[in-house]
Amino acid sequence: MERRTTIAAQQLTTARTHINHLVGALETCNEEICCLRAQAGHANMPHDFELNNRHINAQIPSQQGGNVLAKWIKILGSGEVIARAGEDPEEPEYMVPLHLVTNYSPGDVNTMPYWCEELLQSNGAPFFALTTMVRALDLTTSAEVEHYHRHHKR
């Protein structure tokens, strides 16, 4: 009887160890599945495009009718983006201009600080640094900065 109890306890310990190993393997598999699902969301991304993530509020025609927010965008240096709905690999592309929303509310109107005007009108590294930082914050504002820069060069 005592021998059977010892054998049963050993088998129970072995089973618990095996269960713990399987639980760990299951958690690892679930983590891998989550990573693969996240990557698969971008698997059909067109070449040279990036996920919009609502950075640009561009409504473009949908193949099902109506308009949808662009899923894929390609940023052009001209103050425009090429937008795709993300429904079909052969879908049409739409050129979308970027612009800031005009604010006509009354209030104090101040002139642009001298340092800001100099930075917007500069060439080379200072202007590149400015556009890099602005683009990281807001693509629409980045387009306005580039538009101002080009307009000043005329």
Image: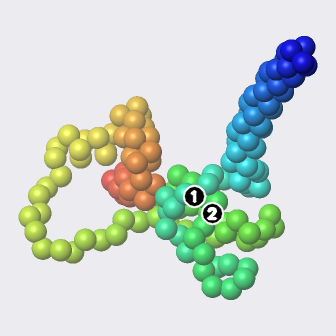
Judged left or right of residue 49, residue 148 is left
Q: Residues within 10 Å of mark 1 (few under 14, many from 20)?
A: some
Residue at mark 1: 52
Residue at mark 2: 71
> Which residue type carries mark 2?
Lys
Residue at 64 percent of width and 79 percent of height: 61
Q: Residues within 10 Å of mark 2 (few under 14, many from 20)?
A: many
Regarding mark 2 in the picture, which secondary structure is present there? loop
> Which residue type carries mark 1?
Asn
Residue sticking out furthest to the left: 108
Mark-to-mark CA distance, 2 and 1: 5 Å
Q: Where does residue 24 sit, x and y in percent of width and height?
A: 74, 30
Do the residues bearing badges 2 and 1 touch, measured as CB atoms within 8 Å? yes
Which residue is at the front of the view, 65 or 105?
65
- Quadrant of res 123: top left
- Quadrant of res 36: top right
Earlier in the chain: of badge 2 and badge 1, it is: 1
Q: Which quadrant does the N terminus fall into?
A: top right
Residue at 41 percent of width and 66 percent of height: 99
Q: Is residue 114 above or below residue 25?
A: below
Q: Is residue 88 above or below residue 110?
A: below
Which residue is at the front of the view, 37 or 68?
37
- In the rendered image, is residue 81 in sight? yes
Q: Which quadrant does the C terminus fall into?
A: bottom left
